[in-house]
Amino acid sequence: MHAPPANTPALPPQQSVIPARTEGQPAPGAPPDGRSAPPWWMWAVVSGLFLVYATLSLRTHERLLSHSFDLAIFEQAVRSYAEGHLPVSEVKGPGFPLLGDHFSPVLALLAPLYWIQPSARTLLLAQAALVAVSALPLMRWAHRALGTAAAVALGLAYGLSWGLASGIGFDFHEWAFAVPLLACSLAALGQGRLRAAVLWALPLLLVKEDMGLTVAAIGLLAARCAGKGGRRLGIAAAVAGVVWMALAMLVVLPALNPSGSYFYAGFLGGGDGAGGGLGQLLHKATIGLVTPETKVATLVMLLAPTLFLALRSPLVLVAVPTLLWRGVSDYASHWGTGFHYSLTLMPILFAAFTDALQRRGTTAAGLRRYLLGAVGVCLVMLPSHSLGQLLQPSFWQTDPRVAVAHHVMDRIPDGATVQASDHLVPHLVHRTSVSLFGWADSRPDPEWIVVDTRVPPELRWPLNPMDESIALAEARSRGYRTAAEESGFVLLSRTR
C-alpha cells in the first residue's frame, strides 16, 4: 500500500448507519456507488479463499477425519431433500426427523447440487464457496470507504481469521449459509442501506432457529437511525425475528421432535451449584458469562483480529445474541474457540471493524497500521487453528490404511443398512442407510457393521477400545460373521 506521510489530513468519514452522518466522498480509486460490478482482484481474493477452504475440507475428508456428527447428519438431510421428502437422519436415530432437531430448511437449496454429485464433497465445496464469497460485500464496502489496498487487506484478514478456519476445518454446518447473509446485511447496514440490510437478514430465519435474535438485533439497529418508514421496517424485522424464534423453539421443533420438546433447551439448564430457579438464572446472566475463564479468553480471541476496534462500532451489538447463548450454555464446547461456533461471529466483527475504521476518519498511515496489524494477528493465529494444517507435511501424506478402508467398505452393497465407526460414516451416507456403531440411538441389527479398531485414542468416539471390543464380540454372538478383516478394519455381516 502506498501511503502519504503520517501528517496527511484524515480521510473523510463515510456514511455510517449509527449514528447517521453526512456522506463524505469515496476513497480515491473507489467506485462511485455500491452498484458497480466487483473488480477482478476481489474475485481473485474470493477464488483464493475458496481454494484454501476447499483444500482443507476435502483433504480432511479424504484422510478419514470427517465425522458422523456433523457431516454425515447434514448429508443425510440434503440426501432426503434430493429424494423428495423431509429430512431424516439415521445417525440421529431410525428415521429421525431433522426439522425437529434444528429448523434449517435452507439445506434444501443444496438438493440440486446433490442430484449432480451425491457425495459429502458436495456439501464441503458448497460451504467453501459460501464462506469465501462472504468476503465480497465486506471488501466492496471497504473499497468504497477506505480504498483498494484497504479492501484487499481486510478481505485477507477476514478470510484467514481463526473463526472461519475453525468452522471450515470441522465438517459442514448450516451456518455456512448465514455467513454471506450476515456479511451482505451488515455491509448494507454500515452504508446506510437499511432496506437492503433487512432484506438480507430475514432469510437467516430459515438457516437455524437461533438466528432469530440476530435478525432482531439487525432490525433494531436499522430502526434506531432510520426515517419513519425505515423505522417501521426495522421494528418489523426485529419483531419477526423474536416471534419466529419463539415459535420455532416452543411450537415447531417440539412438534416435530420425537421427544416432544426442544432438545437444546437442556443446554441452558443444569447448573454448577449456584442454586436453581431465579438464582441460577441470575448467576448465568452475570458472573456465569465470564466464568470459567475460557469464556473471557474466547472473547479476547474473537476481538483480537480486529485489534479490538470492532468495539467502537454499534454493529458489534449484532454479535451479542450469539455470545449470550454461548455464555449461558452448560455445554463446555460452546465456550471455547473450537468447532464451528465462531463461524457466524466473524462477518459481524469484521463489519464492525470496517465501520469503526470509516467512522474514525483516520489518516492513511494510521489506516495502514490498523489493517496490517489485523492481517498480522490473523497470520500469527493461523498455525494454531485449522488452516495451519495446510502448512504441515503430515497433512499432505496419505496413510495406506485409507485405501484399505475404502476397499473394505466397497464390499457393502448399495442400499444396505450399516453401522460404522464415526469417521467411516460420512463415506457411506450417499449409498447406504448408515448409523453410528456404538451409539445408543442407532438402528439396531443392521445388515453390516464396519469398524476401525485402530483409531487413535484422542479421536475415538463414542466407544473406547475396551467397549468397542466388547460390542464387536456381542455382535458376533448374535450371529454376525466376519466378512473382512484387514489393517484394523473389521467388517461384519449378517446377510446370507
Image: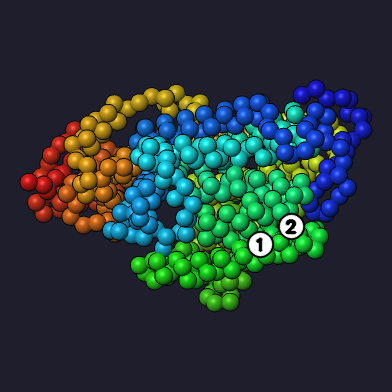
Q: CA distance from mark 1 to mark 2?
A: 9 Å
Nearest the eye: 259 or 380: 259
Q: Is residue 132 above or below residue 81?
A: above
Picture quadrant of residue 372: top right
Instruction: Find out whether the residues at labels 1 and 2 contact each other: C-beta distance under 8 Å.
Output: yes
Element at label 2: helix
Left or right, residue 273 beside residue 17: left
Q: Identify which amino acid the numbered label 2 is placed on.
A: Ala
Residue at image position (42%, 33%) is 58
The circle on residue 237 is 1
Q: How is the image coloured?
A: rainbow
Q: Identify which amino acid the numbered label 1 is placed on.
A: Ala
Residue 398: x and y in percent read 35, 26
Residue 374: x and y in percent read 70, 35
Check disc 2 and report the residue beneath it. 222
Element at label 1: helix
Nearest the eye: 65 or 347: 347
Nearest the eye: 453 or 444: 444
Residue 289: x and y in percent read 61, 61
Q: Is residue 112 visible?
A: yes
Left or right, residue 417 beside residue 119: left
Residue at image position (80%, 22%) is 2
Q: Is residue 220 visible?
A: no
Crowding around mark 2 (Cα neighbors within 10 Å: few <14, some 14 to 19, many 20+) is many
Whichever of callouts 1 and 2 sits on the residue coming sooner in the sequence is 2
Nearest the eye: 406 or 50: 50
Residue at image position (15%, 44%) is 492
Q: Quadrant of the N terminus?
A: top right
The circle on residue 301 is none
